[in-house]
Image (cartoon, coloured by chain):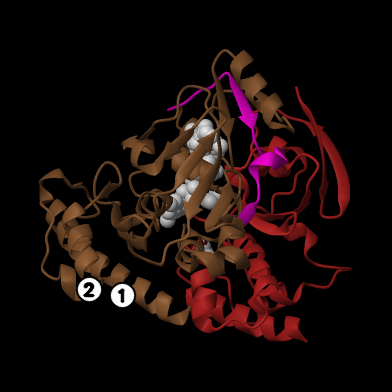
Chain colours: A brown, B red
Amino acid sequence: MYDFKFHNPDSLAAALESCSQAEDGQFMAGGQTMIPVMKQRLSMPSDVIDLGSVEDLKGISVADGVVSIGAMTTHALVAADGDVQRAIPVLAALAGGIGDPHVRNRGTLGGSIANNDPAADYPAALLALGANVHTDRRQIAADDFFTGMFETALEEGELAIRVDFPVPKAAGYAKFGNPASRYAMVGVFVSQGSDGVRVAVTGAAPCVFRISEMEKALSNNFSPAAIKDMTVPAADLNNDIHASAEYRAHLIGVMAARAVGDAILREGAA
Amino acid sequence: MPELTMTVNGKQVTGSVEGRTLLVQFLRDSLALTGTHVGCDTSQCGACVVHVDGKPVKSCTMLALQADGRDVLTIEGLAKGGELHPMQEAFRENHGLQCGFCTPGMVMASVALVQENPDPSEEEVRHGLEGNLCRCTGYQNIVKSILSAAKVMRG
Ligand SMILES: Cc1cc2nc3c(=O)[nH]c(=O)nc-3n(C[C@H](O)[C@H](O)[C@H](O)COP(=O)(O)OP(=O)(O)OC[C@H]3O[C@@H](n4cnc5c(N)ncnc54)[C@H](O)[C@@H]3O)c2cc1C
Ligand code: FES
Ligand code: FES
């Protein structure tokens, strides 16, 4: 890892200031992706702006049908939060299924979505729940936020502050984890909310995406049977040492049906 | 070089490090606390697990400067007054280590696991160890050790 200048601002304003003044500054959340990437010398910022002491970026609140989570809130805190567990139980479960306990104590919501790993869990939740990302300068709908493999709508120096998740009527998630990394080989998040049914798939393609055909079928009949035998073309899916594109295509159908079942079960339990 | 101050195993320590110095490097190289191991250096194996403010983290994937002002506990700080921690004792009793390389991380992860869930099922223990690999594949006895230590720790 190349050396860099370390900044430890304790306010939002100071964090933005440090980044804008640096030659090639980069924000660091928990470092769970950034440190490994820097070790490999795939990234070599001149300045690292650590967000760990910026209290304005932490915390969870639930009000008026919206769960609002600060960018620096760790996966462990989301998983254990009683308010999240009550409002969107599957979101707490998703956070509790990321990586392992040690990673969950450092990894954050903001870092996960800014990184937009094709196999990360949170992007599927944001897209399916129709969440909004609030940054230091604007609000970005999840539909516009995830733009490609490791690519987002965030501009140079733009800081994600929090994500607002509308509370759905029902929502479920099913992930087929890679047995070694725990990242999603295929993960499907399904939600039934005020603007209809949304189905988002992670892990299968270079970027998280929605399946409108399934959304239509589930709008008419929210049950696993409604999407039985529905397939997704393998042509655009990832093909790698972990799984072939055809295998992933098959998994999408299986995981989608399980996610719908999960949503129905959770709604019944609520 | 930037200066830092933290509490390690109950004692306040200061040091100067580079921005890129990892927490595990500071512990091993500056403080000579070599109980914390580096197995993979890629956030996979958990040999480097220590507690920061009471929570287990992978110290190969945290900058030393990110622990500035925090409270760090390593395997060296677990025994009290020459007496092994119940988790260490249980690993010894149940043959929970073979070569011993993964052991410091396993023990630190396990102590945190039982602190959070004092009466875990076998499945919860196995699940809780997802971030810790044992190259000797001694999981059977590691799980046995943790279940037995949990009983002692519950009192
Ligand atoms: C062993 C292991 C297993 C994992 N398994 C999973 C898994 O199963 N599922 C999953 O979804 N993820 C998984 N992860 C990823 C992990 O959960 C983290 O979410 C991810 O690594 C991001 O880490 P971080 O929050 O520490 O961000 P960092 O690594 O600190 O930052 C990542 C990127 O985001 C940028 N950034 C951070 N915060 C902000 C912000 N507020 N605004 C703008 N940009 C920002 C940084 O500049 C950097 O480019 C795993 C990671 C590891 C190491
Ligand atoms: S050395 Fe840190 S996880 Fe392997
Ligand atoms: S005892 Fe050898 S690696 Fe676990």
x, y (%) of residue B87? 70, 74
* Camera-side residue of B118 and A109: A109
Whether residue A103 is visible, yes or no, is no
Q: Which quadrant of the figure has residue A77?
A: bottom right
Discs 2, 1 touching: Cβ within 8 Å: yes
* Image position of B121 (left or right of B104): left
Separation (CA) of disc 2 from disc 1: 6 Å
Q: Which numbered marker is on residue A224? A: 2
x, y (%) of residue A167? 47, 60
Q: Residues within 10 Å of mark 1 (few under 14, many from 20)?
A: many
x, y (%) of residue B53? 75, 54
- Kindly tell me whether mark 2's CB lies below 8 Å from ligand 1: no
- B41 falls in the magenta region: no
Q: Relative to A51, is A21 above or below?
A: above
For the residue marked with disc 2, what is the amino acid?
A: Pro
Task: Name which residue lies at 39% across and 50% down.
Answer: A130
- A49 falls in the magenta region: yes
Q: Secondary structure at mark 1?
A: helix
Q: Chain of mark 2?
A: A
Q: Which numbered marker is on residue A261? A: 1
The stretch of residues the image draws in magenta is: A42-61
Q: Are marks 2 and 1 on the same chain?
A: yes
